[in-house]
Amino acid sequence: MKWRWARTALALLALSLVGPTRGSTQPSRPGTPAEMMRLLKVGQWIKLDGPAGRESTVQCSEAKMLAGDFFDGDWQITSDVRVVDPQRQTLVVFTLPARMGEEVEFKGRSESFASLAQVKVGMFVNVEGTYLKDGTFLAKKVADKSDELVKKPDHLGHVLVRGRIDRVDPARHSVTVMGIPFVITSSTRVKSVIR
């Protein structure tokens, strides 16, 4: 009995020193875009960033696989405002329609940025809230990020999202979050982040 236990302990020690093997169930960290595409699953949290392409697609320049505790209100989109409708309390950020929540918070360089009336078409904003099943966004916070474009003019035309994956299309090398497809290329920088 003692020998069997000693052999088992020695085998486990050897495996722990060697590390995970191919086919292991231990989660691995992606190193390349191709590895990341193989690891992605619908419902997984991810952060994607890149310049807007033709139509409604985005060429993904950076992808971060997120791990940790996320809640329904942790969704985020940062991009340019395309439509503002103060009467209906809605705006469109890139292609995502967003309506203002009851106690939405507005944050900007000046105190005058306090309502949807100050949001203008073309403004670079960050909107946080909840992505709803009907394909719209319920905003709890709208922040004016236009001053970032002065410091980082290459962010003009960029789209950044944080949310759950809707769809993974390996054939097209794309990942869809909040209805927005991001095309993953060999030049996409891949990171893993634990929150």
Image (cartoon, grey):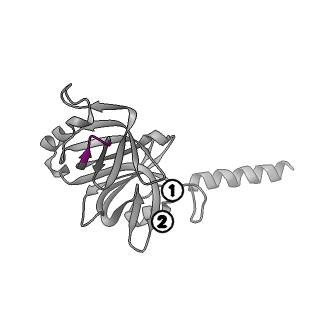
Q: Residues within 10 Å of mark 1 (few under 14, many from 20)?
A: few
* Residue at screen point 44% across, 64% down: 37
Give left or right: position of 81 versus 102.
left
Most common SS among magenta residues: loop
Label 2 belongs to which residue?
38
* Rendering coords of residue 117 (x, y %): 22, 36
Is the C-beta separation of discs 1 and 2 under 8 Å? no
For disc 1, the marked residue is: 28
Instruction: Kindly report which numbered mark, 1 or 2, lies closer to the viewer in this rendering.
Output: 2
- Whether residue 85 is in magenta: the answer is yes
- Spot occupied by residue 67 in the image (x, y as percentages of width and height): 49, 46
The quadrant of the picture occupied by the C terminus is top left
**Residue nearer the viewer, 17 or 79:** 79
Q: Earlier in the sequence, mark 1 or mark 2?
A: 1
Q: Secondary structure at mark 1?
A: loop
Q: Residue furthest right?
A: 1
Q: Residue shown at 35%/64% (left/top)?
A: 184
Q: Secondary structure at mark 2?
A: helix
State the residue at coordinates (61%, 51%).
Answer: 16
